[in-house]
Image (spheres, helix red, strand yellow):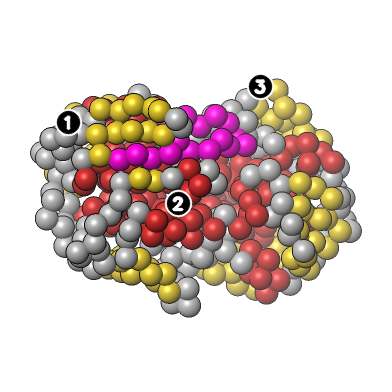
Amino acid sequence: MQKLVVKGKKKLSGVIKISGSKNATLPILAATILNKNKIEINGVPIVRDVITMVQLLKNIGSNIKFDLKKRKIFIHNKNRKLKTIAPYKLLKTMRAGVIVLGPLLSKFKKAKVSLPGGCAIGSRPVDIHLYVLKKLGAKIEIKNGYIHAQAKKGLVGKKIRLPSISVGATENAIIAASFAKGTTLLSNCASEPEVRDLTNFLKKMGIKIKWSTNRKIKILGNQNLKSTTHKVMFDRIEAGTFIIAGALIGKKLKISGIETQILKKEISVLKRMGVKFQISKNDITILGSKNIKPVSIKTEPYPGFPTDLQAQIMVLMTKANGISKIKENIFEKRFMHVPELNRMGAKIKILGDSSFVYGPKQLNGAEVMATDLRASVSLVLAGLSAEKTTIINRVYHLDRGYEKLENKLRKCNANIFRRN
Ligand code: UD1
């Protein structure tokens, strides 16, 4: 099994170019099921989850090609007959696979999609996904680990309030409603930038979608879709991760290929911690930070602080002069990285849904175990700022969502290598 070996305390400097967003690419790929005309998607990140989604689409019969050199995906499903089954083997490692349920059901009036596999960060049910699809007219049964859904007369637009905010369920609902008959009004939607990227893509295919304030979306279903080209937005979690790396151990580290406007919350938290930046529209240079201050934050749906950056900011909090607090509001088991950080010399206590980080602490290298995607990268950040050598096991978690992480860091002076 592959591991990452990090020799810490090397100052990072130079430029890191951010890749396309994994979390935007996945629902956009699922939405291509609706359209049989030519589609080209640009700026696709080469990460495991995207490759799994490409395999899933191939498995259901889509004519999809991923040009890895150009980071482009081409899809043309004219005269193709797609299957309506998404098997367990492709959903067990990637929960986002369940987003094919909405488009398959909407387009083919039936779908059989495996319930996604378990997950280290919490139980992650799909009840909200099923709730919205039922409201659009689907009959749904769970049998032998599969969701069996059908809508004999097709889905029909409706006014639906999501019972709580979910990114995936909002995406499933939007895609399903895009091909349904009539108009759908969704409220209490997730408004993450990746959901907006999905709606931008759907609009280019010919669907009328209007966002209004207060998390509401109006969708006019359309079954006559056109050919389109789309460039995926930047990965704001990758960007946030490298910005935190810069705050931890950077000396003029520039993060490029981003929209700083989208990272407002993250930047404001880091400013409160005393991190110094030069900010422009499409890049940010972290100048360093001598005296890190403690802060209290909570994770929330966008535009709040993202749960996907919680583990990374916690590493920076170990450097702060005082006690920082993180309240995790999205996932119930998302402090799996805490025991590993404590093994590296941090002092972090968990109390219910909150963690208290006692700083400042100098971290020391250790052999540690990655438990999920974002926890793994927090251990890399910890290793970069620690004394001596850190070995991170189970890096396959990291490869699900970070493209060439160690190469990007090495170019900026980090001493990090992959070993078998
Ligand atoms: C997406 C992101 C993930 C991020 C998360 C929260 C993708 C591919 N993944 O995951 O990186 O951490 O948003 O920003 O975009 N829930 C239910 N029932 C449901 C659905 C969700 O109870 O049917 C709960 C979840 O357990 C969780 C909360 O709602 O507690 C939010 O989850 P959700 O927004 O759905 O996350 P994902 O779409 O899975």
Q: Does mark 3 have its CB less than 8 Å from ligand 1? A: no
The answer to whether one can see residue 273 in this image is no
Q: Does mark 2 have its CB less than 8 Å from ligand 1? A: yes
Q: Main secondary structure of the magenta part?
A: loop
Q: Does mark 1 have its CB less than 8 Å from ligand 1? A: no
Q: Is residue 263 above or below residue 101?
A: below
Q: For the C terminus, which image quadrant?
A: bottom right
CA gap, disc 3 to disc 1? 38 Å
Q: For the N terminus, which image quadrant?
A: bottom right
The residue that appears at 44% across and 58% down in the rendered structure is 55
* First along the sequence among labels 2 and 1: 2
The residue that appears at 15% across and 44% down in the rendered structure is 221
Q: Position of residue 48 (x, y in %)?
A: 54, 58
* First along the sequence among labels 3 and 1: 1
Kind of element beneath mark 1 = loop
Q: Position of residue 377 (x, y in %)?
A: 66, 52
Q: Position of residue 193 (x, y in %)?
A: 39, 49
CA gap, disc 2 to disc 1? 26 Å
Kind of element beneath mark 2 = helix
* First along the sequence among labels 3 and 2: 2
Check disc 3 and give the amino acid type. Answer: Gly
Question: Is 306 in the magenta?
Answer: no
Question: Is 125 in the magenta?
Answer: yes
CA gap, disc 3 to disc 2? 28 Å
Q: Which residue corresponds to mark 3? A: 352
Which residues fall within the magenta stretch? Answer: 111-126
Quarter of the image for residue 142 reads: top left
Q: Which residue corresponds to mark 2? A: 23
Q: Which residue corresponds to mark 1? A: 158
Q: Of circles 3 and 2, which is in front?
A: 2
